[in-house]
Amino acid sequence: MPDSRSSSSSRSTIRFLSLKWKVLLTLGMVMLSVNGTLSWLHFRDLKTRFEGQRTDLRERLISEAIAVRTDSALRLQTQASLLATVGAGSAFQSKPGSLKLREHFDSYWPVLQLDLDINSMKVYSRTGATLAAWHADAASDIEQDDRVRAVVSQERALHWMHCRQICTQFAAAPILSAGRVAGVIVLGSSLGEVIVSFNRLSGADLGVLAPAGFVMDKNSLPNLGLQIVALSGSERNLPLLHQLKVLPPKQSKKNWQLVPYQGKQFELSFV
């Protein structure tokens, strides 16, 4: 009899301990599942917020780049309009192409170059004939002729950008004499100011790509058929651009790429 009671008590103790550990094990599994789910939800929330912040930053930088470029173009257009109104009309009252016309604009040229970073200036007659030129870019003459005709017909100032080996932004304004368009003045300025201003404003780098020319050098991107015509921080950014194989489609929502370099990842956005 004593042995029977001892055996029964031992089995009860074993059953009791087994039930307790089963409950603890179940609770532990539940807690692990809850903690794992909460951690995953927290990670997903952080990732979503990070991606949202990165998208907002990317869109802000693109907007700033466009705004800086537009502001620079409008400022150049304003300068062209001022030159067209300050005494230019009276110079046109003399014989077109005369010494008086060149002397009038010669007086402004040093200031335009040194203080306003103007690289070229051309004065056209109403018919599109070139009357005077200062450091003109012959490669853009055909495009300028079309713009000059547009300024004469519309009687308003215009601005545009021309890229080949270098990128130059132009602005043209009509010169009025006796109440009608007598000619057009065209100013040209490099994009250097835009590149530097954007870098100072945002801390990010900016580059301009154009169709590749016949000369292959370190600024050529043969995989893309493009060349780099302007770039800030070129020492650190040239290797990144040389790794590109394709560009994202225009107007694509994913207009950016992550490029690994020296153990880091760099994000390149395209406008």
Image (spheres, grey):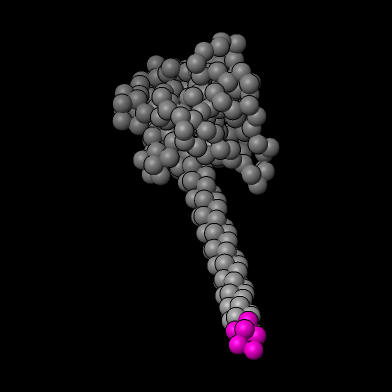
Identify the magenta region. 1-7
Q: Is residue 2 magenta?
A: yes
Q: Nearer the viewer, residue 203 or 239?
A: 239
Q: Look at 61% across and 78% down and name the residue there.
A: 14
The image position of residue 234, as x and y in percent, is 43, 26
Q: Nearer the viewer, residue 163 or 2?
A: 2
Can you give x and y, in whole percent of width and height, for residue 163 in the image? 55, 25
**Which residue: 60% across, 11% down?**
214
Residue occupying image coordinates x 55% and y 56%: 47
Query: Is residue 64 left or right of 109 when viewed as pictured?
Result: right
Q: Position of residue 130 (x, y in %)?
A: 53, 18
Using the image, determine if residue 34 lies above or below residue 120.
below
Which residue sits at x=47%, y=36%? 264
Q: Is residue 124 visible?
A: no
Q: Is residue 44 visible?
A: yes
Q: Nearer the viewer, residue 27 or 267?
A: 27
Please name the predominant secondary structure of the magenta segment in the image. Answer: helix
Query: Does 40 sit left or right of 218 as displayed?
Result: right
